[in-house]
Image (cartoon, helix red, strand yellow):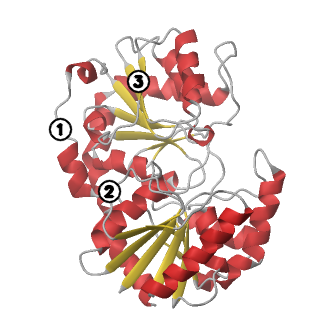
């Protein structure tokens, strides 16, 4: 089968990692093509790569569509799977010269964009018009599929759930890599860790503020936050002003966060919204106790798969089957001068409890890898092929 993926780039991100893993897995038996709108590649991949993007203006976008059309005529794929908004639009607008066109939705939709109502309107119009022409919609979680049906009137028969994959075998190998001297100094007793882009939706400033309170009782505890992004300077400033320079580390982007995760005690994930967070699944694969906000969408489906995926916001922690679900932060930016919110206080309280109780950590650490295997790339790859063949 000739399978093509259309995505803006292969830089750091959940959608990009999903393409990296699936192209590597599926390339053993299928012809794989990756079409990028930008020549930005940080993840490994397998298959033929083509850069079709031009400058981000009208003339550049027009050239991109022409290049995309010509490329499709040339390689004649059996299916094109697009990820992220710009790629979805190109995939949906192209004339029907491809046998099957699929849109794989990774991000949780919100009816009103939190910063720009024009973006919300544009998104709604796309879903009500051009996106209806594709053959199938893939959603990264059950709640995401539900929201697409409710907000954008997507036909239930046209939508399937495809979870994001992880490579269990690779993680098992990489987490055993040795630490250098500087990395060993990052760890405390206990060590909390967060992995994710430094962006608004990840809510890391809430975590830092909560950790400040928890560290009053957990005197030897440390927090490592791995990633990069536009909020780096805000987070760095907050750490400094809270006098946490020796307790909290912003660890830059790394190709192997697993050696840090595998030696930590608790994975803390205070996201405000998600699609299906890959880093949370990777934390389970590393055998970590997980504390995650019960945000839309993904964490509940991962940690409490037997519970309803659409529920009321949590007010108290929930000891779920595979991890601890916590109230989701409100997403309001706050600095060192403002008091903790009730949610931040709840996080601080339970970080202290979990950080002090090895029995809780042992219990969850022992069953975490069992759940992670449900998302292994081999299983997700087979699911994708089944959907394509329907």
Disc marking residue 33: none
Query: Which residue is the site of mark 3?
Result: 223
Q: On screen, 323 above or below 25?
A: above
Q: How many marks?
A: 3
Marks 3, 2: nearer the viewer: 2
Q: Are marks 1 and 2 in contact (CB under 8 Å)?
A: no
> How far is mark 1 from mark 3, CA to CA?
20 Å
Q: Are marks 3 and 2 in contact (CB under 8 Å)?
A: no
Which image quadrant for residue 291? top left
Indicate the position of residue 77 as horizontal and vertical percent values.
44, 85
Q: Residues within 10 Å of mark 3 (few under 14, many from 20)?
A: many
Q: On screen, 221 above or below 205?
A: above
Indicate the position of residue 301 as horizontal and vertical percent values.
49, 58
Out of 188 and 348, give the one closest to the viewer.
188
Q: Which badge, 3 or 2, comes first in the chain's sequence?
A: 2
Query: Which residue is the site of mark 1?
Result: 177
Relative side of 232 to 303, left or right: right
Out of 216 and 31, give the one closest to the viewer.
31
Circle 1 — which element?
Answer: loop
**Residue at position x 67%, y 25% in the image:** 341
Which image quadrant for residue 115? top right
Whether residue 321 is visible, yes or no, is no
Which image quadrant for residue 353? top left
Q: Residues within 10 Å of mark 1 (few under 14, many from 20)?
A: few
> How far is mark 3 from mark 2, CA to CA?
29 Å
Relative side of 201 to 49, left or right: right
Query: Which residue is the site of mark 2?
Result: 44
Q: Are marks 1 and 3 in contact (CB under 8 Å)?
A: no
């Amino acid at each position: 089968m000739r399978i093509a993926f259309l995505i803006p780039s292969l830089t750091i991100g959940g959608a990009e990692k999903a393409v990296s893993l699936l192209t590597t897995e599926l390339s053993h038996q299928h012809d794989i093509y990756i079409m990028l709108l930008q020549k930005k590649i940080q993840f490994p991949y397998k298959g033929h790569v083509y850069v079709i993007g031009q400058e981000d203006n009208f003339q550049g976008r027009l050239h991109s569509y022409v290049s995309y059309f010509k490329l499709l005529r040339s390689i004649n794929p059996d299916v094109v799977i697009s990820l992220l908004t710009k790629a979805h639009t190109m995939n949906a607008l192209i004339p029907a010269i491809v046998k099957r066109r699929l849109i794989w939705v990774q991000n949780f939709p919100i009816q009103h964009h939190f910063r720009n109502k024009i973006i919300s309107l544009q998104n709604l119009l796309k879903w009500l018009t051009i996106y209806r022409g594709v053959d199938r919609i893939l959603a990264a979680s059950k709640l995401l599929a539900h929201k697409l049906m409710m907000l954008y009137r997507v036909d239930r028969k046209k939508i399937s759930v495809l979870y994001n994959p992880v490579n269990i075998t690779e993680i098992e190998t990489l987490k055993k890599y040795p630490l250098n001297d500087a990395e060993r100094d990052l760890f405390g007793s206990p060590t909390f860790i967060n992995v994710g882009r430094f962006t608004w939706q990840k809510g890391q400033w809430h975590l830092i503020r909560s950790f400040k309170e928890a560290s009053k009782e957990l005197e030897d505890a440390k927090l490592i936050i791995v990633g990069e992004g536009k909020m780096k300077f805000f987070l760095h400033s907050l750490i400094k002003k809270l006098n946490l320079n020796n307790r909290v580390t912003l660890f830059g982007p790394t190709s192997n966060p697993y050696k840090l995760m595998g030696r930590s005690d608790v994975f803390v994930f205070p996201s405000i919204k998600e699609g299906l967070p890959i880093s949370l699944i990777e934390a389970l694969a590393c055998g970590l106790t997980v504390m995650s906000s019960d945000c839309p969408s993904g964490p509940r489906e991962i940690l409490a798969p037997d519970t309803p995926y659409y529920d009321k916001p949590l007010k108290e922690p929930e000891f779920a089957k595979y991890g601890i679900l916590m109230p989701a932060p409100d997403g309001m930016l706050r600095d060192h001068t403002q008091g903790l919110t009730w949610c931040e206080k709840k996080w601080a309280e339970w970080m202290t409890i979990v950080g002090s109780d090895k029995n809780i950590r042992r219990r969850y650490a022992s069953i975490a890898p069992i759940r992670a295997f449900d998302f292994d790339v081999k299983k997700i790859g087979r699911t994708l092929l089944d959907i394509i063949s329907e």
